[in-house]
Amino acid sequence: MNDPMTAPVGPAQDTSKAPEAAGWEPVNVREFERHAQLMLSKNAFDYYASGANDMVTLRENRAAFNRLRLRPRILRDVSMVDTSTSVLGQKISSPICIAPTAMQRMAHDSGECATAGAAAKAGALMTLSSWSTTSLEDVAKAGGPGGARWFQLYVYKDRKITEQLVKRALAAGYTALAVTVDTPVLGRREADMRNRFKLPEHLTMGNFVSAGGAHASGTKDGGNDSGLAAYVASLIDRTLDWNDIKWLRTICGSMKIVVKGVMTAEDAAESVRQGVDGIWVSNHGARQLDTTPATIEVLPEVVAAVSGRCEIYLDGGICRGTDVFKALALGAKAVFIGRPVLWGLAHSGEEGVSKVLKLLHDELVMALQLTGCTRVSSASRSMVTHQTSYYSKL
Ligand SMILES: Cc1cc2nc3c(=O)[nH]c(=O)nc-3n(C[C@H](O)[C@H](O)[C@H](O)COP(=O)(O)O)c2cc1C
Ligand SMILES: CCCCCCC(=O)C(=O)O
């Protein structure tokens, strides 16, 4: 297996098969996606890009942001803008954080290490997937001692494996566990079914190498189906409930606990009752239950139910600085981006991720300036309205 820290530029960056991609400097996230489509194998691009079933929610995650209108304030000296903030007491340079996405080495040989390097350079928070193609220890090393890092947890049926993973994350300096709660079974991703999705043979699930066998390969023979769905069905614990969150608290040491995948006021209120440290509003990038609402649409009900008792984060469909602004204005403490990071990786590894982070950061700064805000906490509820509110006043 290649050492991800020193691996040569891999086939994903070979533009000889995609001459249209050579020298293309995308100017927005959607162009990074189009570029990635030219560069990546169909197996990899479809896995990264698709949503579940008819992808209604995938479209909604974007469309709902576009239905919101901004109400800018004027004459407020925006010559200096400060985007810094904090999550769970940790200072970060920007409210734009990195969501966990599995198997990043399909996008670039340097995969998760490149993402960690770019995050550390930008002072951004990175969340590493349980299903990383690099070990969590190597990713921590790549991010360096100052890097802000959370670890995303999938709970395995084999609780010893789960417990070891949690202990390793603690030892490696991850400061929070983002427990993903929306994935008792894998969503129906039809492109992966058609492609009979498989993790390429030269890659492994970096956190499970010592567990060996199916744990490390990341896919099982799914027959005519996606190998990922078969892997999840055989190894991931679908009995997960609130008692497991209590159990995780007993083994996670100083790491905080964030539940990732909250979509209703009821579950937000229950999460607070159960004493979680943070609530992550997410529909898993529209890859699990299709026809749920967009995340930005459910944010207000979650904010109301939580009523300031813990931090709230949001992901899903963010690809503009104005999207970030809208989520902050509606009560998110920070936002997370999933696919945009993969598109940056596919473009040019660490440099590509840095470019995506900078692009979104610059767009956020401009959104703040043009709405009359000099810091992220100035983005307020009154600055966002639904497009229909203008028609109702006619
Ligand atoms: C290719 C891919 C892999 C993902 N892998 C994980 C994962 O391992 N763990 C997890 O909790 N969420 C995973 N997610 C969901 C993301 O963390 C996040 O919720 C979602 O991507 C946000 O939407 P966005 O891609 O529109 O930014 C994955 C998403 C994608 C697109
Ligand atoms: C227990 C479900 C694992 C899902 C695999 C990675 C992921 O979250 C995704 O593909 O989406």
Image (spheres, rainbow, N blue to C red):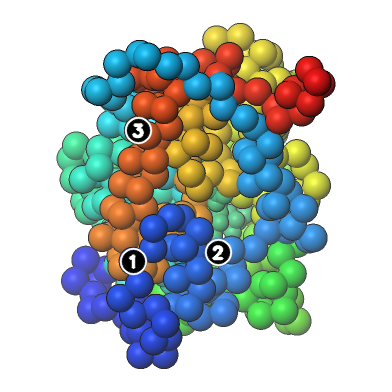
Q: Quadrant of residue 385?
A: top right
> For numbered disc 2, what is the local secondary structure?
helix
Image point 50% across, 69% down: which residue?
34
Q: Which mark is residue 25?
A: 1
Would you say 261 lies left or right of 188 here? left
Quadrant including the N terminus: bottom left
- Give the spatial CA distance, label 2 vs label 1: 21 Å
Residue marked by disc 2: 48
Picture layout, residue 52 above or below residue 84: below
Residue 120 falls in image quadrant: top left
Residue tagged 3? 365
| Label 2 crowd bin: few (<14), some (14–19), many (20+), radius 10 Å | many
Q: Are marks 1 and 3 in contact (CB under 8 Å)?
A: no
**Is residue 122 in view from this perspective?**
yes
- Cα–Cα span, label 1 and label 3: 21 Å
Image-quarter location of ligand 2? bottom right
